[in-house]
Amino acid sequence: MPSPRRTVFAAVCAVLAGCAAPADPPRPVLRPFDYSHLLPIRLDVAEVEIVEAWVPPRAPPHVDHRAPIEPRVAVRRMLEDRVQAWGRQGKARAVILEASLIEQRLPREGGVGALFTTQQSERYTLTLSVRLEVEGAPGGSGSAQATVTRRRTVAEGTSLAAREALWHEMLVSAMDDPQGLNVEFEFQVRRALRAMLAPDGAVRATAVGGVERQPLPPPSAPQPGLQMAPSGLAPASGTLGTLPMR
């Protein structure tokens, strides 16, 4: 017959085992962002250049370089797939102005009550901003800009895997939902640069591959190909494009 001391010890071990945090689930294999199935934005220019004006700081409070897919990679893929040169003269520059994900520590509440509540410990802000500039097109010159933002908070003790999943959900929402960058960018371009779009039914004058592709700087860590379904996040904010100049 087991002694009372041994029985109490076994009971304590069982309680501790039951309270242990569950192991993080394995990270899912996600697919890259892809916009090649969408109708392209056909510009009446001879050349399109993609410029990365945003250089990831790779230091706190920035964490975009730690995301499963870096925001700048998703934005560049959208521009490569959507913006096409369709004319014989003029040039367009698609500029990635910002693709940041910033971590902000939140103040902690004190007192005895705080010992029995789970507090929000960090806020993450994702900002994506691009500008399209057109020069020398038959329809004139001008520019259009689009910016979207997402914000989310996490509770204290949130694991790295859970944070990575949240960062990716924020990126999917910021890129692909009805108020995301993909939709906002096209809206601003068609609004501000209508005269610089190729006419309906026009035959493409430039050869396929008219987009000038600049190689991405090597990331600090391997980037797995990813994509998740978006969750309900904060609404986007957009900027109005500038009117075309003649």
Image: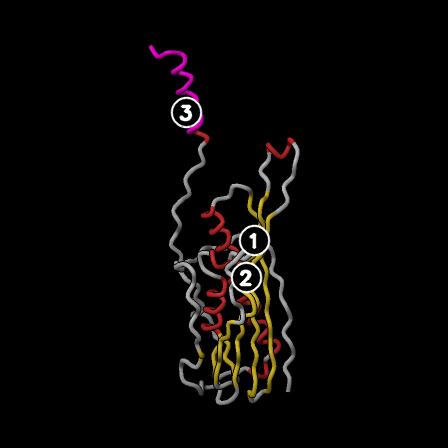
Q: Which residues are magenta?
A: 1-17
Gap in angstroms between the C-alphas marked 2 and 3: 45 Å
Residue reaching furthest to the top: 1
Q: Judge by depth and name the residue closer to the eye, 25 or 61.
A: 61
Residue at 60 percent across and 32 percent down: it is 115
Q: Secondary structure at mark 3?
A: helix
Is residue 16 in the magenta section?
yes
Give the labeled residue for mark 1. 103
The residue under label 2 is which amino acid type? Ser
Give the labeled residue for mark 3. 14
Residue at 64 percent across and 84 percent down: it is 245
Q: Quadrant of the N terminus?
A: top left
The residue under label 3 is which amino acid type? Ala
Q: Earlier in the sequence, mark 2 or mark 3?
A: 3
Kindly report which numbered mark, 1 or 3, lies closer to the viewer in this rendering: 1
Label 1 CA crowd tier, 10 Å (few <14, some 14–19, many 20+): some
Asked whether, in this view, residue 98 is left or right of residue 76, the answer is right
Q: Is residue 80 above or below residue 27?
A: below
Q: Judge by depth and name the residue closer to the eye, 163 or 28.
A: 163
Q: Earlier in the sequence, mark 1 or mark 3?
A: 3
Residue at 48 percent across and 89 percent down: it is 88
Label 2 CA crowd tier, 10 Å (few <14, some 14–19, many 20+): many
Give the labeled residue for mark 2. 100
Q: Secondary structure at mark 2?
A: strand
Q: Judge by depth and name the residue closer to the eye, 108 or 145.
A: 108
Q: Main secondary structure of the magenta part?
A: helix
Q: Secondary structure at mark 1?
A: strand
Gap in angstroms between the C-alphas marked 1 and 3: 38 Å
Residue at 49 percent across and 72 percent down: it is 79
Q: Are marks 1 and 3 in contact (CB under 8 Å)?
A: no
Q: Position of residue 49 (x, y in %)?
A: 49, 79
Residue reaching furthest to the front: 59
